Image (spheres, rainbow, N blue to C red):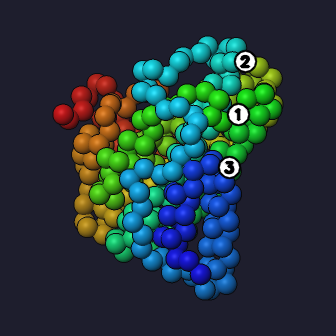
Amino acid sequence: MKSLAQMALDVLQTADGRAKTALSHKYAAEWRAARANGNAIEIGSAAPPMHPARPERPELLSPRDVPRRKPGSEQGRIALLHAVAHIELNAVDLHWDIIARFTHIPMPMGFYDDWVSAANDESKHFNLMCDCLEELGSHYGALPAHAGMWRAAEDTAKDFMGRLAVVPMVLEARGLDVTPGMIKLFQNAKADSAVAALEVIYAEEVAHVAYGSKWFNFMCGRDNLDPKEVFHSLVRHYFHSTLKPPFNEEKRAEAGIPPDFYWPLTEDFPAET
């Protein structure tokens, strides 16, 4: 049987979104079955690519070049669903990448349980968004997408703590802030399938942010470091912007991130250069 790191590499090297997520689901099921039977799959090691395989479409553009569409129109709602699908596909790769890239750092088996589970969830989320797009006569790849989604992975490719700080605890936590507004927009449009899909994503993303917080705090505890100070330092170093309110403080707290972690990183407190 392949090691978990080899499984992660297979997912990262699969270009098509539907095929990537099908493989992700398959390997997550194999990991869970082995763990349940007391025959854990070897973690192993791998050399993941700096960039995961991607389909020819969507065309990837600089953030400032991605067309902006009014969300009140059907085309605007399609564009929003397409953007979320793109985020979810990147999330699939981000979660398999953290498994494959940092196997040299000894971690408890629970760490791998969490990130396999997160990757499995993100695979479901991508397919939910694709289904919604297809219901509206579109598909993933029909519109251009944000080229900068993988930047956090590149920047933190050699910094495990930086990866935990920036991806789940900043980028995914931002999803907790903005998703309720998206759900309301689709509710107003009576787009029931999109509402149901976004509600699944919103509920499950809390756990992904919590995984980041849990393992970040675990690493700080192991090295006797102050988590808040380390978090502020890493985010100021790797995140190329300030954090912007409003924040979903209730869901962030549920995920284990207290306000004194993120408020000092808002635009009122300039980031380090």
Q: Confirm whether residue 168 shows in the render.
A: yes
Q: Looking at the picture, which amino acid does disc 1 mark?
A: His
Please give the label number shown on residue 169. Answer: none
Provide residue 20's location: percent of width, then percent of height: 62, 54
Give the labeled residue for mark 1.
Answer: 139
Provide residue 198's location: percent of width, then percent of height: 68, 37
In this rendering, would 247 be left or right of 34?
A: left
> Of callouts 3 and 2, which one flags the residue occurring earlier in the amino acid sequence?
3
Provide residue 121's location: percent of width, then percent of height: 64, 54
Q: Are marks 3 and 1 in contact (CB under 8 Å)?
A: no
In the image, residue 166 sits, relative to residue 146, either above or below, namely: below
Residue toward you, 188 or 27: 27
Mark 1: secondary structure: loop
Instruction: Between label 3 and label 2, give the one nearer the viewer.
Output: 3
Task: Decide: few, some or many residues near mark 2? Use Cα within 10 Å; few <14, some 14-19, many ≥20.
Answer: some
Measure the alpha-carbon separation of dots 3 and 1: 11 Å
Provide residue 180's location: percent of width, then percent of height: 62, 31
Q: Quadrant of the N terminus?
A: bottom right
Instruction: Between label 2 and label 1, give the one nearer the viewer.
Output: 1
Q: Looking at the picture, which amino acid does disc 3 mark?
A: Arg
Residue at 70% over, 45% down: 127
Residue at 51% over, 81% down: 42
Q: Looking at the picture, which amino acid does disc 2 mark?
A: Glu
Please give the label number shown on residue 18. Answer: 3
Mark 3: secondary structure: helix
Residue at 56% over, 40% down: 56
Measure the alpha-carbon separation of dots 3 and 2: 24 Å
Q: Confirm whether residue 80 shows in the render.
A: no
Residue toward you, 204 or 261: 204
Give the labeled residue for mark 2.
Answer: 74
